[in-house]
Image (spheres, rainbow, N blue to C red):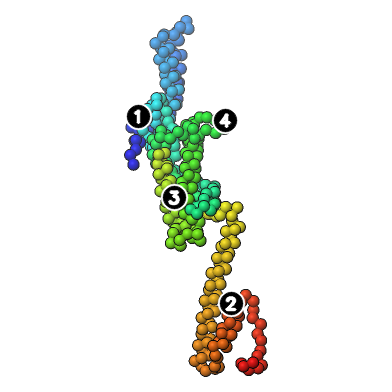
């Protein structure tokens, strides 16, 4: 993607050297000013000007110091003109008339609170996500979006130049865009496959695909601000409280039906095996009516929820 960001190539001097010069110049200016005073208290205009300038330049030097830690950057502006991005780690001195915006390039984490959205079939669900992001393009971050407005809080209408206030503005931008992207992605899928084709991906069963689409949507929305998505994952998924009880009963009913199917399947195979063994071993001859009665009794015993109570038959099979 095309970017207008470039490295700062202006004058950069060692910060400790300029710190020494910054202390030395005012002392030198005062010494010049004092030494230029004559016996009658008069002072040469040239000496006075030189002394005053030395003091002013010494004070001005202290405006040009820049200290950067790893994964931090400064956007350099000279009377409103972008002059590049400064990323050299350490203590340095630059033109004191250059205005800077301090940015952090480190990865940041956003744990978004669960929000209520409607899934593909219209069921309200609560869904939350965790997001890891960082700044990639400092030019877009400062000049392509209105971070001044985003940073406004109660009682404060200015952005400031400290890294905390600036990054707080981007955090709010990321939060708003992540909510919009999450709503868009969640609305394309059903919560589960109870009401859709079992081959379709769902929010509950297709986590990797959902996370991949979520990252793509976030990249599209946040690219304008020079923000890169490192990872985006859904970390909370549940039905909304107003339908949670109903959906729980539906899930319980589905589980009971599945369990019953397994029980019936096993009971049928056991009854079949019993009839085949009785016939092969010649233990007893059963006509169709007695086979049906035996099958009925065995199915009741095998499929019943309660323990069967045995009844001892002391008569004959003809009774």
- What residue is pinned by disc 2? 303
Of residue 115 and residue 82, the one placed in the foreground of this image is 115
Is residue 120 toward the left or the right of residue 82 in the image? right
**Would you identify the image quadrant in which residue 56 lies?**
top left
Residue appearing at x 41%, y 33% in the figure: 143
Give the percent coordinates (x, y) of residue 102. 44, 34
From the viewer's perspective, is residue 249 above or below residue 312?
A: above
Outermost residue to the front: 289
- What residue is pinned by disc 4? 155
> Which of disc 1 and disc 4 is earlier in sequence?
1
Of residue 38 and residue 168, the one placed in the foreground of this image is 168
Of residue 81 and residue 124, the one placed in the foreground of this image is 124
Element under label 1?
Answer: loop
Q: CB atoms at circles 2 and 3 under 8 Å apart?
A: no
> Which of disc 3 and disc 4 is earlier in sequence?
4
From the viewer's perspective, is residue 51 above or below residue 286?
A: above
- What residue is pinned by disc 1? 11
């Amino acid at each position: 993607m095309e970017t207008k960001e470039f490295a700062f190539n202006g004058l950069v001097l060692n910060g400790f050297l300029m710190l020494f010069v910054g202390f030395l110049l005012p002392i030198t200016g005062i010494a010049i000013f004092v030494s230029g005073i004559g016996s009658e208290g008069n002072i040469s205009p040239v000496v006075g000007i030189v002394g005053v300038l030395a003091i002013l330049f010494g004070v001005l030097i202290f405006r040009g110091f820049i200290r950067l830690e790893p994964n931090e950057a400064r956007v350099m502006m000279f009377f409103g003109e972008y002059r590049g991005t400064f990323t050299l780690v350490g203590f340095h001195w630059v033109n004191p008339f250059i205005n800077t915006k301090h940015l952090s390039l480190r990865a940041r984490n956003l744990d978004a609170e669960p929000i209520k959205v409607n899934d593909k079939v219209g069921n309200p669900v609560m869904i939350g996500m965790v997001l890891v992001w960082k700044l990639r393009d400092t030019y877009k971050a400062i000049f392509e979006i209105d971070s001044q407005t985003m940073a406004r809080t109660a009682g404060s209408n200015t952005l400031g130049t400290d890294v905390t206030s600036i990054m707080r503005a981007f955090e709010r931008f990321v939060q708003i865009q992540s909510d919009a992207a999450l709503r868009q992605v969640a609305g394309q899928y059903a919560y589960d496959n109870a009401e859709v084709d079992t081959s379709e991906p769902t929010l509950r069963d297709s986590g990797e695909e959902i996370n991949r689409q979520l990252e793509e949507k976030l990249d599209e929305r946040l690219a304008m601000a020079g923000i890169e998505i490192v990872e985006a994952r859904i970390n909370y998924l549940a039905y909304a409280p107003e339908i949670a009880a109903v959906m729980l009963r539906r899930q319980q009913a589905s589980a009971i039906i599945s369990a019953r199917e397994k029980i019936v399947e096993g009971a049928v195979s056991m009854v079949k095996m019993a009839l085949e063994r009785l016939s092969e071993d010649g233990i007893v001859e059963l006509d169709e009516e007695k086979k049906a009665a035996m099958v009925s009794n065995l199915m009741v015993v095998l499929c019943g929820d309660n323990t069967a109570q045995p009844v001892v038959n002391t008569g004959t099979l003809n009774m």
